[in-house]
Amino acid sequence: QVQLVESGGGLVQPGGSLRLSCATSGFSFGMYLMSWYRQGAGEEREFVSSMAPIGGHTTYADSVKGRFAMSRDNDKNTVFLQMDSLKSEDTAVYYCKAYSTLIGLEYWGQGTQVTVSS
């Protein structure tokens, strides 16, 4: 059974930091492109970052470049999103996604709420 479980969300003040985790199981983690997306209230889900399975090439949305850093631990089948210098506009539910470019399958986690507010 495929599982992606996000954690680490919460309430933080502007300028603060949070580290999200996405623990996975049930698929070949080391062969999947892993990504983070987010969806604010009343908004469409948007891309945040992604990391290739081999080599670790990372891509970020312009809105988070220089503030967010994605990493993955292939031994623990987990990806992380370090979020620094958080802004109110970063408030959203953050989702983890796994995508296989070989077979075209994708899996999503249930999301974790991040709220940036004073």
Image (cartoon, rainbow, N blue to C red):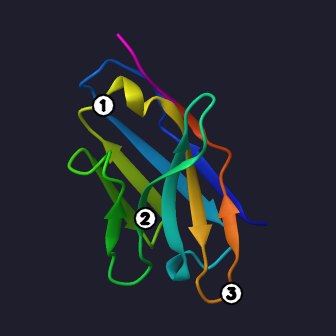
Check contact, mark 1 vs mark 3: CB within 8 A.
Answer: no
Q: Which numbered disc, 2 or 1, marks the residue that appears first in the sequence? A: 2
Q: What amino acid does circle 3 point to?
A: Ile
Query: In this view, which residue lies farthest toward the top?
Result: 118
* Cα–Cα gap, marks 1 and 3: 36 Å
- Span of residues in magenta: 114-118
Quarter of the image holding residue 90? top left
Q: Residue at x 48, y 66 (%)?
A: 76
Q: Are marks 2 and 3 in contact (CB under 8 Å)?
A: no
Residue 26 in view here: no
For badge 1, the amino acid type reads Leu
Label 3 neighbourhood size at 10 Å, few (<14), some (14-19), many (20+)?
few
Toward the right, the furthest residue is: 1
Name the side, left or right, on which 1 lies relative to 62.
right
Name which of mark 1 and mark 3 comes first in the sequence: 1
**Which labelled disc corresponds to residue 103?**
3
Q: Position of residue 78 (x, y in %)?
A: 49, 61
C-alpha distance separating marks 2 and 1: 19 Å
Please name the amino acid that badge 2 sits on.
Ser
**Helix, strand or loop at mark 3:** loop
Q: Assess disc 1: are there few (<14), some (14-19) or many (≥20) residues with their C-alpha within 10 Å of its C-alpha.
A: many
Q: Residue at x 29, y 21 (%)?
A: 14
Tag 2 residue: 50
* Secondary structure under the numbered disc 1 in the rendered image: loop
Asked whether 62 or 7 is in front, the reply is 62
Tell me where residue 67 sits by quadrant: top left
Q: Quadrant of the N terminus?
A: bottom right
CA gap between label 2 and label 3 equals 18 Å
Task: Give the residue number, with chain letter if any, for mark 1.
Answer: 86
Q: Quick one: SS at disc 2?
A: strand
